[in-house]
Image: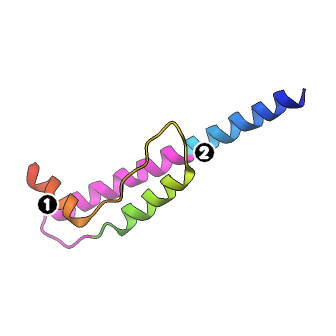
Amino acid sequence: MSVHKDLINHAANQNKSYQEFLALDQLREQYIQEAVELCKQGKPFSTDKINAITNKMNKINLRIVSIRKNVTVEMVQEYVKSL
């Protein structure tokens, strides 16, 4: 019976980690959009908040999602130029 409890606990922990990952991913996208908008307006911006969230996401270490890359100022600028 303890194996079943262990499996249930493991699944619950995995789900909790996945939900945390999704929340961080949403926040990361928000920060990316903020950087893009500032770049479009020619205002100074930083990718520090984006990369702090990215690093937290990557530490969660879920096997079902790929590692997220850190974002550079140049990456944002290139993206804005391509619009």
Q: Magenta residues? A: 20-45
Query: Label 1's element?
Result: helix
Left or right of residue 33, residue 41 in this image = left
57 and 22: which is toward the camera: 57
Q: Look at the image and say whether residue 13 sits in the magenta stretch.
A: no
63 and 20: which is toward the camera: 63
Query: Label 2's element?
Result: helix
Q: Residue at x 81, y 35 (%)?
A: 6
Q: Position of residue 48 (x, y in %)?
A: 36, 69
Q: Look at the image and say whether residue 26 sits in the magenta stretch.
A: yes
The amino acid type of the residue labelled 1 equals Lys
Q: Name the quarter where the N terminus is drawn.
A: top right
Q: Mark 2 — residue?
A: 17
Q: Any mark on residue 40, and which?
A: 1
Q: Position of residue 50 (x, y in %)?
A: 37, 61
Q: Quadrant of residue 17?
A: top right
Q: Residue furthest bottom?
A: 44
Q: Position of residue 53 (x, y in %)?
A: 45, 59
Q: Mark 1 or 2 closer to N-term?
A: 2
Q: Residue at x 72, y 37 (%)?
A: 10
Q: Main secondary structure of the magenta part?
A: helix
